[in-house]
Structure formats: C-alpha cells, structure tokens
Image (cartoon, rainbow, N blue to C red):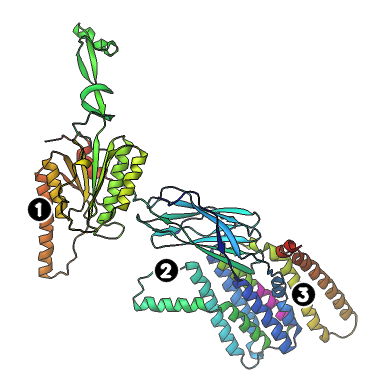
C-alpha cells in the first residue's frame, strides 16, 4: 500500500505517460539514425542491434524504477532469476549506451548536417524525458533550463549552417547564411550568458 | 508512543555527486565532440551544444553539511493509524529537496515529498502508518537535494526514531455492568436508591425526605404524600487480564495480537465510561496495575501492556492472582487463547473467590496436521481437550465467548451487555 503524499508542491507525472513518451523518443532516435540502412558503412547493423537492446533495457530500467522493489520470499528459483534480471536492468547505464550507439550509427552514415541536427534535438528530448520519468517530475522543473536549451538548439542550427557552407558556391546564398549564422550566434549568447551569470553559486561568491 | 518531544537540530553530512541526468548529458556532449573531431563533421559538435550549455551551469560551491530536525507529529502512535513526521531543513535554500521514507517491514510510508528551493528554513510533513504494535524503527529518511539545473545531487540518509505503537483498540460500544457495584460515585445506575438521575420508583413520604422529590401525580392519586426515588450512580471496578503466555496464529492476527487489541479496546471503553480499570499481565511473570481512572491511567495501562515480556515461563504461583490487583466485587475480563493450564487454574480460583469473570477466547488457529491417521487423531484429541477446558469453565460459572479479532467486541459480549450481569458468590 502506498500512502498519498501530503504536501508535494511539484506536479507529478504518471510514470506511464513518461515511459510512453520516452519509448516514442527512443524508437524515434534509433529509426532516425539507422535508416536508410543500405547507405551505412560496415558495423551499422551491429550498432543498430546495440542501440535497440540499449533502448529496450533503458525502458525496462525506467519501468523497474516505477514499479519499485517487490518483496518476495526470495528462495524460489524464479525469484532468484527475477532478482538477477532486475539487478542487471538496474545496474548498467542503458540510456548512456543508447546515446553512444545512436551517435555511432549516425556517424556510420554519410554526412547529413540537418539530419544530425534533428537527431541532436530528439536525443536531447529523450534525455529530458528520461529525467522527468525517473524523477516523476512535471515538465515545470525544466523551466530554468529552457533558455539554455534554446541557446543550445540555436548553436545546433549554427553548426548545420557551418557544415552546409562548403556545399554552397560563393554568392548571395553564402552571404545570407553568414548573416543568419551571426544572428543565431548572438541569440545563443544572449540566452546563455544571463543564465550562467545568475547561477546561485556565482551570486553567493560575489 | 513517541520517544521524545522537541528534537534537537542535528547536523548531517551531505554526499554530493553528479546526477544521473548530468551523467547522460556528459555522455552526449563527450560523444558528440569526440565524433566531431574523429569524423571532422561540425554537425556533431552542434549536436552536443545543448548538453554542453546545460553542463556549463555546474556549480562547485556546495556545503558539506545540512542541519535538520525530525519530529514525530503525534505523541501517541497506534497501529494502523496514520502519523505525521515533521521534517525541518535548515539551509541549502538554493536546492530543491525530495524527502522519501524507506520504511521497515512493519511500516507503510507515503510517496516522496518535494520541497521547493527558496527559503532558509523549509518544512515538510511525511506520513507513515505503523502496521504492528511493538517497538521498532520507522526506517530511514533519504533526502535528495537537487540544484535547479538538475546536475548535482546531494544525498542525506538519517535514521528515523524508534517508536512503540500501541495496539489498535478493538471496537466496543457497549459495556458489561455488574448487578452489585461498589459505593463509589460513577455513571452506572445501581440497584440501590440514591441521588442519580435515573428514575427507580415511587414510595411514601417519610419525615426527613426532600420535598423537591415529591411526586405530585402519585400524591394526588393516593391522597398522601409520595415521592420519586432514583437509582444511585456508581462506578465499577474492571480488571482486564491479558494472557501473554502464548502467541499462536498468523502474524498480525495471532492470539497475542488479539489479546492486546481486545484488552486495549476494553480499557479504552471502560475508562471513557469513567469506570476504574486495572490490568493484570499474565505472562512469564505477573505484572499488574490496580484499578484507576483517567487519561494518565490509560497511558500507564497501555505502557504496562507494551512492556511486559511475553513467552512461556514455568514460574510457580501464577495460578493464584494477587489480591492487591483484584478489588472485591470487580468485573474481570480475561483475554486468552486458554492454552496455559495455569491461567485456567487461576480462573477457577478467581471464581471460587467470588469474582464475576468473563473469558474472551482469542484462539483462532489450530495445530497443523499432515492428514495421517495419527496426526488426525492427535488433532482430534487436542480439540476435545480445548472443548473440555472451555466446558469446565462454563460449568463453574465462567462464561467463555469467542472473538475472531475482526468483528467488534460487542458481538461476542452481546449476551452480557444487554442486561446487568448478576454477580454470584
């Protein structure tokens, strides 16, 4: 039996919704980075297998954390196996493994700057979803991170532009991209610097 | 009961570490930058940018200690009744805190409680439900401090206080009242006339009677002065005997559990009715408190019940209960599984001494048997023996009623609560 919390100011999310959102994002990043499989270099299938396994296990890890520890008599063989499997699921950093596998998968394909940028956005979203699910927090706890996330996404867009530049010939398009890049950089800095300056530790130091 | 009132402010060490979220961001950032360098593709560096920016807010300035106070919100804990634990956190106002109780096996705890950053002194109320009586720790309290960017986690683990929850009092709305009550002012109408409020009858006026009690309708009918009489209001002495010599049955509903819950219910009921209640613990040795009244006496009785050692002991002299614990004319309510022959002998002795005794039998289990003929025969002999014990008590005027521990105590005691129990000598 679980008792209701009496004074919980933060709005909680149901773990079911969080796990569903995380599953969708995990599947999305794996599919996005893997396909088309035919254009991938050697090792693509192996990286895909690792990514799928890590994705499934990371979801199992979240589900196990949501369910909590079930008490059992502990002497039956089935209980022992269940406990060993639960230990395995909980012990390894599956989400980190998924990140690495997905990035390797993306690197095994030919350069696709906008594609990689979209993967970055989805991966960041996946990490935030995992965090919200495992801490059972509402999206409101990310309010402080929002300017930094926007700045980071602006920098990602900038990197796409930088990566795309060699493909353009000199001319008006090149100049336009440079101007847009400059604007994006200014926006990113203006978003990030105030947040960095208002850190509690820094304010106390002054 | 809680061990103490105002708890001192305690300083606890905080173990700071990188949060799981920060670790994942770090992996994304490092992997992105490494791939950008290895593959010479700038977009991978851009992919790592959000993670790098979030990690840039990392702050190294963290205090290694936190001051906090844990206080049990209620002075008396009762099994099955929710209790509050007040936690005061002093300092670390820049960090959100999540408080979670990891309870011991006999305690149910609520969900984690989140406390937002912002105030130098923050309070939270956590709820626990002790599911068993006895003395044990509530568990440990885990406080996790998190910075606003969710990169750093500080963990504090502290032991929650030991508690001694009282057994849950069995429900009892009615009460058994004896026909002869001692001459002490109380709330039970006695058979003798007195200054109570319950109408007893009408009699002729004799010089010296109070005129305000003249019954005018009767006076008019009879043509001579008559007056109303009222019952005296008396208290009764109730002695509860709790047999703690054996503990058989399912944990949580064993005979000892039922003995304590039943005794607690009877004590609470009779003290609420302003009767004088005493308690005898029949265990390895005898412990008792003579009849008394009031809330303080309730605590004394419950504390005695919780402190008495259980178990089987072949101490001599247990079959004769002490005279000091048994005022003359007391009603004696015995909670017992009737497995100890010494208690049965003591009950016979009480009856011979003229006490009105009611036994509430709390035996709800029987010895297991494997189905073999010998085992069945043994079980049957055991049953016959138990029946014989109960029959012999009934024959000497000691009623034995069975209580399952689930229903109200009113049900088994109903034949004795609907009318006055005549005290035989």
Image quarter hosting the C terminus of chain B:
top left
- Looking at the image, residue B320 sits to the left or right of residue B90; the answer is left
Q: Classify A41 as above or below A59.
A: below
- For the residue pair A201 and A3, the one nearer the viewer reads as A201
Residue beneath label 3, please? A155
Residue beneath label 2, please? A70
- Looking at the image, residue B296 sits to the left or right of residue B424; the answer is right
Q: Classify B158 as above or below B261.
A: below
Prevalent SS, magenta region = helix
Q: Residue at x 56, y 68 (%)?
A: A134
Crowding around mark 3 (Cα neighbors within 10 Å: few <14, some 14 to 19, many 20+) is: many
**Mark 3 and mark 2: span between their CA atoms?**
45 Å
Task: Say whether residue B329 is visible.
Answer: yes
Same chain letter for marks 1 and 3: no
Q: Position of residue B334 (x, y in %)?
A: 21, 46
- Looking at the image, residue A173 sits to the left or right of residue B130; the answer is right
Is label 3 or label 2 in front? 2
Label 3 or label 2, whichever comes before in sequence order: 2
Q: Position of residue B333 (x, y in %)?
A: 22, 43
Is label 1 or label 3 in front? 1
Crowding around mark 2 (Cα neighbors within 10 Å: few <14, some 14 to 19, many 20+) is: few
Disc on res. B388: 1
Same chain letter for marks 1 and 2: no
**Mark 1 and mark 3: span between their CA atoms?**
90 Å
**What element does badge 1 sit on?**
helix
Residue B88 in magenta stretch: no
**What element does badge 2 sit on?**
loop
Q: Residue at x 29, y 38 (%)?
A: B292
């Amino acid at each position: 039996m679980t008792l209701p919390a009496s004074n919980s100011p933060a709005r909680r999310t149901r773990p079911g919704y969080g796990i569903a959102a995380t599953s969708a994002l995990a599947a999305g990043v794996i599919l996005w980075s893997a396909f088309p499989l035919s254009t991938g270099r050697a090792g693509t299938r192996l990286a895909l297998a690792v990514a799928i396994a890590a994705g499934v296990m990371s979801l199992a890890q979240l589900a196990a954390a949501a369910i909590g520890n079930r008490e059992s008599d502990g002497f039956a063989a089935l209980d022992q196996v269940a406990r060993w499997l639960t230990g395995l699921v909980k012990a390894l950093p599956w989400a980190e493994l998924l990140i690495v596998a997905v990035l390797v998968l993306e690197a095994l394909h030919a350069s696709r700057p906008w594609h990689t940028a979209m993967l970055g956005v989805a991966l960041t979203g996946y990490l935030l979803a995992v965090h919200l699910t495992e801490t059972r927090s509402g999206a409101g706890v990310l309010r402080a991170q929002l300017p930094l996330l926007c700045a980071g996404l602006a920098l990602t867009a900038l990197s796409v532009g930088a990566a795309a530049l060699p493909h353009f010939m000199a001319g008006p398009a090149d100049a336009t991209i440079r101007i847009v890049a400059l604007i994006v950089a200014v926006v990113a800095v203006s978003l990030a610097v105030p947040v960095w300056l208002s850190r509690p530790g820094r304010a106390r130091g002054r | 009961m809680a061990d103490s009132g105002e708890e001192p402010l305690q300083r606890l060490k905080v173990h700071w570490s990188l949060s799981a979220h920060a670790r994942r961001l770090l992996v994304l950032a490092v992997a992105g930058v490494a791939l950008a360098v290895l593959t010479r593709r700038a977009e991978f560096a851009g992919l790592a940018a959000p993670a790098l920016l979030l990690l840039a807010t990392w702050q190294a300035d963290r205090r290694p200690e936190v001051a906090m106070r844990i206080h049990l919100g209620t002075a008396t804990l009762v099994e099955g009744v929710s209790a509050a634990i007040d936690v005061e956190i002093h300092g670390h106002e820049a960090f959100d805190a999540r408080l979670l109780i990891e309870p011991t096996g006999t305690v149910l705890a609520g969900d984690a409680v989140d406390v937002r950053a912002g105030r130098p002194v923050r309070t939270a109320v956590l709820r626990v439900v002790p599911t068993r009586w006895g003395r044990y720790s509530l568990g440990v309290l885990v406080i996790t401090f998190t910075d606003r960017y969710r990169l750093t986690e500080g963990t504090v683990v502290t032991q929650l206080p030991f508690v001694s929850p009282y057994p849950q009092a069995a429900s009892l709305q009615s009460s058994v009242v004896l026909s002869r009550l001692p001459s002490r002012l109380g709330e039970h109408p006695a058979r003798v006339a007195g200054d109570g409020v319950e109408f007893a009858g009408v009699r002729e006026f004799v010089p010296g009677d109070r005129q305000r009690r003249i019954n005018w309708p009767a006076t008019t009918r009879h043509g001579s002065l008559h007056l109303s009489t009222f019952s005296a209001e008396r208290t009764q002495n109730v002695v509860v005997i709790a047999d703690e010599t054996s503990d058989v049955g399912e944990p949580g509903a064993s005979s000892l559990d039922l003995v304590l819950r039943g005794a607690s219910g009877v004590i609470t009921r009779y003290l609420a009715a302003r009767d004088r209640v005493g308690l005898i613990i029949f265990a390895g040795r005898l412990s008792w408190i003579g009849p008394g009244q009031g809330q303080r006496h309730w605590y004394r009785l419950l504390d005695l019940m919780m402190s008495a050692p259980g178990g089987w002991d072949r101490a001599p002299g247990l079959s004769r209960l002490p005279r000091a614990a048994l005022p003359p004319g007391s009603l004696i309510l015995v909670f017992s599984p009737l497995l100890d022959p010494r208690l049965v002998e003591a009950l016979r002795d009480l009856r011979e001494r003229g006490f009105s005794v009611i036994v509430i039998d709390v035996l709800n289990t029987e010895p297991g048997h494997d189905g073999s003929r010998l085992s069945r025969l043994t079980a049957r002999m055991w049953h016959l023996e138990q029946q014989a014990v109960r029959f012999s008590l009934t024959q000497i005027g000691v009623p034995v009623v069975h209580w399952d521990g689930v229903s109200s105590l009113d049900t088994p005691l109903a034949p004795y609560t609907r009318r006055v129990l005549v005290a035989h000598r």
